[in-house]
Image (tube, rainbow, N blue to C red):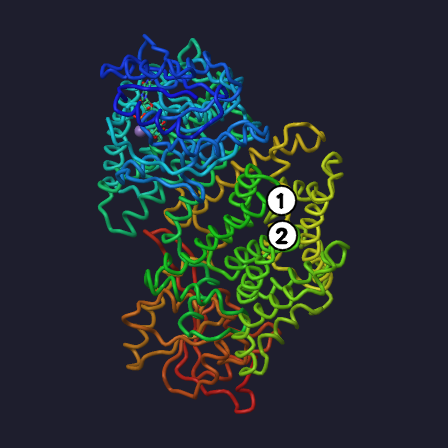
Amino acid sequence: MIVPTLNEAGNIDPLLTRLSALDLPEGSFEVIFVDDGSCDGTPEKVREWENCGNIRLIERREKPDLTRSILAGAGAARGDVIVVMDADLSHPPEQLPALIAPILDGSHDVAVGSRYVPGGSTEGWPLHRQWLSRLGSWLARPLCDINDATSGFFAFRRELSGTVAERAGGYKILLELLMAGQGKLRVVEVPICFRDRIHGASKLSFSHQWTYLRRLMTLAGGTVSVGRAGRFAAAGLFGVFVDALLFQWLLSSGAGLALAHILSFFVAASVSYSLNFKWSFHLNHEGYLRWPQFGRFLTVGLFALLMRGGVLALLVHGWHMPPLLAIFPAIGATAAVIYMGLVFYVFPVKQNPPSLDVRWRVASFGIVAFAVMLRLIYMGMAQLIPDEAYYWNYAQHMDLSFFDHPPMVAWLIWFGTSIFGDNEFGVRIGAFICGLITMGYLYALSRNLYDKSTGIRAVLLLTVLPLGFVTATLMTPDAPLMATWAATLYYMERALIADQRWAWLGMGIAFGLGILSKYTLGLLGLAALLFVVIDPGLRRWLCRPEPYLAAALALTLFSPVIAWNMENDWASIMYQSQRATGIGNKFSLHLLFFHMLLVLTPVGFVAAFMALVVRNDERAVNPLIRRRRLFMQVFTIAPLAVFFWLSLFGWPKFHWTAPVWLAILPAMGWMLGQTDHWSKVASRLRAAWKPTIGICMFLYGLALHYVVLGIPGIPYVGFSEHYFWRETTREVERLAAEVAQQTGKKPLIVGMSKWSVASSLSFYNDKSEPLDIRGRNMFLQSAAMYDFWYPSEPPTDRPIILFGMKTHQLEHDIDGNDNITPLLVQPGPIRELKIEREGKPLRGIYYRVAQGYLGLPATDSQVR
Ligand code: GDD
Ligand code: MN
């Protein structure tokens, strides 16, 4: 037992008294006190006990240091197992036997007395110490999978002390020990109850905490000192100055926000680059970065820039801050991104780099954090796409279910907008949260199928691939679908493979909420049935009550949809099953493949394919591992097969397969981290992931910046006829006011697409002067929920304005029948309304004004 001491005189007697009361077998242990020059008589106190036999004292004469003291003690120790314990009775000696048991019986290499596992606790510590300690162990968690990495009470085999780094010092010896094992140690956490000391004072200082933080960064692969801190800061400050000054000058000379911030960024970055890299970094002999490093530096800068646009937009457009003030927090955010990029990516540590596994973890944390921040910043700034606006209209007509989708999307929007108001953020917050839930369940699933590292990498892939990024950004039924799909898979695995009965309850709930999100989730039920039938060991579940109870629970949750359908002639169910069972015979399998490439990227597509079919023989012998593989295969292939079949007959939608890949992402994440080159293709694939991740993230950032602030030099063309409804609605309102003034009557506004035009106009319409907006069902064309919201419109002599994104929408239906003009009074010609932003063309919208509406013949008034 090693007890480091520094001025602990008052604690020696009580400690040794309690230790001897333990009745440990004589001669089976020794207590080594390592003192660092205490001046309160601690060594003398220990000496009083020395003749008891197994108590020794080492007095160090060097600079006091906790880690060095413990290592000195370990060097002098005679036993095979070493326990480290504080002298101040914070660690109850009574818990010693429980701590060493796992080492003595040979089952583990390190046992940690842990406050942060069930059964562990901390008593008497002031709140700030508790938080600091939690923060410390929380920061170390991604590196070493231990809940209490800062514990000072632990046991290990003596030979391990030789592995601790030469330069290690301070309070973090346990972390050093764990990291030196490169993840190969068998570690167990034993719950302990930590009590604050009664005698003396703590020696933990701010500088210890600071070194701990720096050491954590180094262990994670970051270079902590990138040269001279003072000069670095000076160059940075000068950069901030140049940036802000130039930004202001550009703005005042008429440049837009985007142009001003991008130009000033590039100039400031070049200035501080040339200052920094001549002065303060360790570089090659010419004093510049080598090309690969320069490329990395540019990449980091680009990402920082794309995020900064969002921060600026949020502050200036969202919170109405003056731009000159807003540029400072924006620069701050940029600096944080650049700093982390420099430390971990441009200048990673060269000596003793962390293992590949740790490097992937660190990269994953960084990239995922960046992606989540990007979403959070831009989410409320990017205008809604028409689909989101349509679902917002759902939420304005709350119901048990809806015609084209079950109700979850509406419920989430209702919830978000009642907290944050009727704005983009309120609409999308539900999708954002669903994204986090998806990540959580995917992590847990992958950890159960493989290990924690795989879980982290699977979440990385989910975050960067379009299937995960887009569904977590836009508020469509796919957002809750992804979350519940991941949750269902998680509980399925727990129920069917880990044999946990409670998991059936979770599954019933996840499944029920899932079909409330999108009917597609039902495919997982099919997959589950298939899995149980294929695997003989699982068939017994068919005669047990749990699966049926789970199904009943799911059905109960689904009952609102059934109730709605009963009230509405089964309209929704009919519509969906019509869509699913061979509408037409248009062979579209090639399209499905194209869509799979879109949601997965080409590299992801190949990786998913390999993860599905290639087996790593060595792992395939273990029956449990085989069952896990089968699980992933069945739950991917079964739903996929249905989509294959459907696209033999009709058009697939591009996002159909998005959730399907959740089941195979764990295997993809696992492959990503394998170092043994069990296949040439696999190692090529690993190399290809890096640019794929970079390109995906870049494109998301670019797209968000483009729609929110624009990219100088790139006009808004093409897709924008479906977008930018805020500006469009302003023009529509202006036109409506004009017509009202001319005729003296408030016009009726009709959206002449299925639902896009009407929904988007409703969302962006100024709520204090609402327009009367209707759907195209006024003209014998189906308009989804508008058929239900406005089933029939009486004839009127109010003026009416028809709006369409294409001219043909104002002329005839898809079959070419003009059933529009005959219903209008004095229909005018089709005109285009040009929409601009800051004097530049944004898009157009077509309209047609008439002086009245004749109404539908009575027999035709119910059209779907
Ligand atoms: N030899 C030697 N040299 N011993 C030292 C030194 C030193 O420089 N500094 C502290 N010690 C001894 C103390 O005498 C005590 O026995 C033990 O190390 C722990 O020191 P405390 O000063 O009591 O630390 P603490 O209670 O604030 O911190 C505890 O909790 C931390 C986690 O939050 C300790 O258990 C830490 O190890 C732990 O990291
Ligand atoms: Mn203490």
Label 2 packing within 10 angstroms: few (<14), some (14-19), many (20+): many
Residue 607 position in % (x across, y down): 66, 40
* For residue 131, above or below residue 502: above
Residue at image location 69% in from the left, 58% down from the top: 527
Give the residue type that dot 1 points to: Leu
Instruction: Locate ligand 1 by image quadrant.
Output: top left
Query: Which mark is drawn over residue 163?
Result: none
* For residue 568, above or below residue 370: below
The local secondary structure at tag 1 comes to helix
The image quadrant that residue 196 belongs to is: top left
The image quadrant that residue 646 belongs to is: bottom right
**Nearer to the camera, 854 or 345:** 345
Tell me if the residue at label 1 has its CB under 8 Å from ligand 1: no
**Among the two numbered marks 2 and 1 on one chain, the one whose residue lies closer to the N terminus:** 1
**Nearer to the camera, 415 or 487:** 487
Give the residue type that dot 2 points to: Glu
Residue 281 position in % (x across, y down): 37, 16
Query: Which mark is drawn over residue 449?
Result: 1
Q: Is residue 591 visible?
A: yes
Q: Are marks 2 and 1 in contact (CB under 8 Å)?
A: yes
